[in-house]
Amino acid sequence: MKLSIVLWPDPVLLQGTDSITEVDDDLRAAVGEMRRVLFEERGVGLAAPQVGIAKRLMLVCPSGNPGDEFVVINPEIAEAEGNELGDEGCLSFPGMFGEVPRATAIRVTYQDLDLRTREMELTGWVARIFQHELDHLNGEVFIDRMTPESRAAIEEDLEALRARAPESP
Ligand code: ZN
C-alpha cells in the first residue's frame, strides 16, 4: 500500500467517513503510510480522507516531530469552550493559509490503535489541529470555516486547484 495526499475538491474529502470497529492489518498499514506521508509533507495533522480513506481515523502531531504523533480513532468532542482566530493551512490545499475560528479548549474522547477509549483536555494549538482534522472526518474542510477576508484572499488559488482536478464538480 502506497498512499499519497488527495487534493481538494476530490469527493473523498467532502463525503464524510465511517466509524472503525476493528483494527486489522490493513488499518495498521494505512496508519503507517499516514505517518510517512505526514512527516514527508511536514504536516502537524492528517486525516484518513486526505489519503483517500473514508474512515474515522486521524493523526495529530502538534510538534511536527516524528514519534510525537498520536493516532486518533472515532473522535468526538464532548465539550468545547472559548473561540479564537488562528492561522491554518491544509495539506489538501497546497500553499493556502487563512484565519479560522476554533474553540480554545476542548474535551475529547477517541480510541487508540488498540481501540482503548481515551479522554483528553486540549487547548490552543493542539485543540486547533484536533478540530481541523475532525472536520475532515465529517466531510468539512477549512475553507468552509475561514473568515470571509481570508477566503477572498485565496479564491484565485482555489479556482486554480479546482481547474487541476480530473473532474470539476
Ligand atoms: Zn486539512
Image (tube, rainbow, N blue to C red):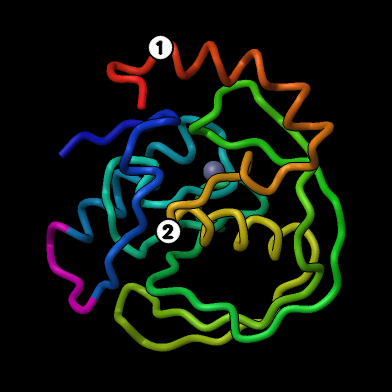
Q: Quadrant of the rendered structure where residue 2 is?
A: top left
Tell me where residue 157 sits by quadrant: top right
The three-letter amino acid code for the residue at tag 2 is Leu
Question: Relative to 90, does residue 135 appear above or below in the rendering?
Answer: below
Query: For numbered disc 2, what is the local secondary structure?
Result: helix
Image quarter where the N terminus lies is top left
Residue 58 image position (x, y, % from top left): 43, 58
Tell me the quarter of the image containing the C terminus. top left
Q: Residue visible at 31% across and 82% down?
A: 115
Q: Earlier in the sequence, mark 1 or mark 2?
A: 2
The rendered magenta stretch, by its main secondary structure, is classed as loop
Q: Along the horizontal axis of the image, is 95 left or right of 38?
A: right
Give the amino acid at mark 1.
Answer: Arg
- For label 1, count other residues whose C-alpha is less than 10 Å away and answer few (under 14), some (14-19) or many (20+): few
**Which of the 4 image quadrants contains residue 33?**
top left
Nearer the observer, 148 or 48: 148
The answer to whether residue 161 is above or below residue 89 is above
Q: Could you tell me which residue is drawn at 32 percent across and 38 percent down? A: 11
For label 1, the SS is helix
Disc 2 CB within 8 Å of nearest ligand 1 atom: no
Name the spot of residue 51 as percent of width and height, x first.
33, 40
Asked if the residue at tag 2 contacts the one at tag 1, i.e. Cβ–Cβ closer than 8 Å, the answer is no
Could you tell me which residue is drawn at 27 percent across and 66 percent down? 18
Residue at mark 1: 164
> How many marks do you count on the picture?
2
